[in-house]
Amino acid sequence: MKPKSLLDLLKTLHDKTACRVYLEGLRWQGIPKCPHCQSEKHYKLKNRGEFNGLYKCKECKKRFTVTIGTMFEGSNIPLNKWFLAIYLFLSHKKGISSIQLSKDIGITQKTAWLMLTKIRHNMNDIAVIVANKLDGVVQIDETYIGGKTKGRVWQNQGRSLKQKLPVVGLLNDEKAYAVVTPDTSGRTLKTIIYALVKSGTTVVTDGLPSYRGLSPEYNHQVVEHNKGSYVNKAGYHTNGIEGFWSQLKRGLKSTYHFVSHKYLQFYCYEFSYRYNTRGISDIDRFVQFIQSRHKQLKYHHLACT
Ligand SMILES: [Zn+2]
């Protein structure tokens, strides 16, 4: 059942019916399950003699399809276009612009933008990381993204589009997570670190005073960048998270050109997800995404401002 290449994928998922059957296989393993009461007893409802994936539960009598509760629920875009968009988006290392996607799959740029935003929203790994906190050696760093003004111009009020937003990144050998924050105060940074990093872990940061006090909860290693050093005496560094920032910034600049404050977090999801799945093939990443991502985002959450 699993496609092995893009050509395979195109053959397997050639139209919306094939995609619906494929999604049913991934979600239900062949036995349709009512999303309202979890019953597996159902009727298949036909429309003019044709079955199009609409079921009726024998227990609670409610109707359902395989897309209920998923990011595809209520969407007018056929599943085959969704699947192709997801495959293309996940396999492009620097992402894909809405203009490019609209040309690739034959939709308007606005639709492509909405699809990409919805996909990005579903790339959020926070639940996985909170449930299984980062350990080992965790590099933590803060950076400023967006706008055109140079330097650290963040203030708590008078936020303008020219200003950069602080983003805090955490990374170990396996996972990365980046979160847009209101500021880089000790309280903000520590709230994030306590939520996402296992106690007792070695954390490596720069010399920003906000990180003071992480010890003894953590083995806190400091690399004093302002003194021109990139490795501390114990051999710890923050090269990994700095590489992550340059990828994120390069991607934002070359593929997306401009990212509004409102959607910066979504792009952080996107680039974290790519890092977190870098060890698996494009097809596996696609299957994993379709299988595990069932969050919805309503249209009004996406309205562009
Ligand atoms: Zn039911």
Image (tube, helix red, strand yellow):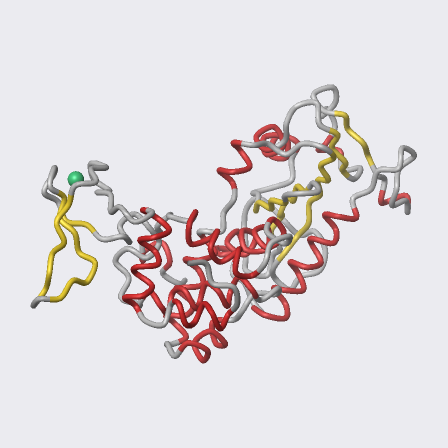
Depth check: give the residue in front, 173 or 158: 173
Residue appearing at x 74%, y 51% in the figure: 242
Depth check: give the residue in front, 229 or 3: 3
- Left or right: 207 in relation to 1: right
- Which image quarter has ligand 1? top left
Depth check: give the residue in front, 88 or 228: 88
Give the quadrant of the C terminus. bottom left
Residue appearing at x 24%, y 43% in the figure: 33
Picture coordinates of residue 26, whole percent (x, y): 37, 51
Depth check: give the residue in front, 43 or 128: 43
Residue appearing at x 15%, y 45% in the figure: 42
- Left or right: 8 in relation to 81: right
Outermost residue on the left side: it is 48
Height in image: 147 above or below 230?
below
The quadrant where residue 280 appears: bottom right
Residue appearing at x 84%, y 38% in the figure: 236
- Left or right: 113 in relation to 221: left
Give the quadrant of the N terminus. bottom left
The quadrant where residue 281 appears: bottom right
Picture coordinates of residue 89, whole percent (x, y): 51, 65
